[in-house]
Structure formats: structure tokens, C-alpha cells
């Protein structure tokens, strides 16, 4: 089966399939004319790789447990390498979520202070932004005096 057929059957792009082959996740045989030839097992593997990528795994991470997803599909859920990789990915996502929640809370505090809905004054809220590199890099921020040149 040609690479375009695999792409149609899996939803992966031809470019992605070529990349999977380049990094060693799949191995296509070559016909005499140089065209890649894939079989049904390759189609299943490309689908599994796609599922892992949609979960947030990189191709490098997938390579560490590739043997678990190449073999019997039942081993995907029981392979220790897959379980360990999923736990690590989940922990990373939970850290990202905690960081986003912290940012969200800081934004809400600032917005409440700016709209007068909170006892915290805007200057006090902005004082907390002193540790924020974005605030420091803003041309009108007091800590950025002399860092930016006026145009004109």
C-alpha cells in the first residue's frame, strides 16, 4: 500500500508518515522504483502513534516505548514503559494546569482591583508585577526607564 493510502486510512499526513519513518518509528519496505510500501500492521501503528501524539507525547517519547505499541495491542495498557510514560505526561500536564491557575488568579486580582471591585489598589497589585519580566519590559513601566528609545 502506498503512503497516500496510509494517510487516507489513518488521518495522518503524508509528511507525518515520512517523519515517523525518518525517526525510526515505522519502517516501510521499498519497491524497485523507490516507492514506500506499507502493510496493514503499518496502518495500525500509524494510528497508535497518532493517538499518542494527540495525548501530547513527542516522537522521541514514543520511541522509548515503541516496542510496546508495535506488538500485541493488548500490551499497550499493560506495558510498564507505557504506564510510566503516561504517569510522567499526566504529572507534567498537572504542573502546567497549576501554573495556568496561578496566572489566572493573578489576572483576576488585577482586573478586580482595576475595576474597583476589590480592596486591593491598582498600584499595590502592580507592585506584584515587579517580578514579571513582561511588566518590566514594557516601555512605560517605571523599571524600564532608559531601556527603550523614542522614535521620531
Image (tube, rainbow, N blue to C red):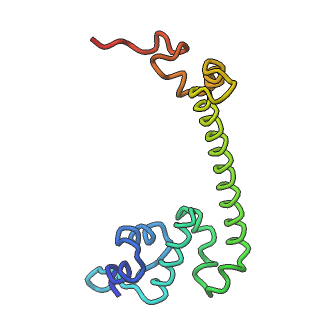
Give the residue drawn at x 65%, y 51%: 97
Give the residue drawn at x 39%, y 83%: 9
Report which quarter residue 58 is drawn in: bottom right
Q: Is residue 146 left or right of residue 119?
A: left
Q: Is residue 30 left or right of residue 113?
A: left
Give the residue drawn at x 45%, y 18%: 139
Is 13 rendered above or below residue 100? below
Viewer-closest of 31 and 140: 140
Viewer-closest of 25 and 85: 85
**In which quadrant will I find the N terminus?**
bottom left
The image shows residue 147 at horizontal and vertical percentages of 46, 14
Q: Residue furthest front?
A: 117
The image shows residue 77 at horizontal and vertical percentages of 69, 79
**In which quadrant will I find the C terminus?**
top left
Give the residue drawn at x 34%, y 79%: 3
Q: How many marks?
A: 0
Report which quarter residue 114 is drawn in: top right
Amino acid at each position: 500500500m502506498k503512503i497516500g493510502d496510509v494517510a487516507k486510512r489513518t488521518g495522518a499526513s503524508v509528511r507525518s508518515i515520512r517523519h515517523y519513518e525518518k525517526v525510526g518509528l515505522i519502517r516501510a519496505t521499498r519497491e524497485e522504483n523507490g516507492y514506500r510500501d506499507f502493510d496493514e500492521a503499518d496502518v495500525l501503528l500509524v494510528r497508535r502513534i497518532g493517538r499518542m501524539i494527540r495525548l501530547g507525547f513527542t516522537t522521541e517519547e514514543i520511541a522509548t516505548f515503541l516496542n510496546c505499541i508495535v506488538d500485541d495491542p493488548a500490551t499497550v495498557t499493560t506495558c510498564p514503559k507505557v504506564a510510566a510514560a503516561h504517569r510522567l505526561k499526566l504529572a507534567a500536564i498537572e504542573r502546567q494546569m497549576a501554573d495556568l491557575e496561578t496566572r489566572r488568579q493573578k489576572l483576576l486580582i488585577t482586573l478586580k482591583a482595576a475595576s474597583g471591585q476589590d480592596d486591593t489598589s491598582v498600584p499595590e497589585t502592580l507592585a506584584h508585577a515587579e517580578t514579571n519580566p513582561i511588566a518590566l519590559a514594557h516601555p512605560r513601566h517605571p523599571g524600564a526607564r532608559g531601556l527603550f528609545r523614542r522614535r521620531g
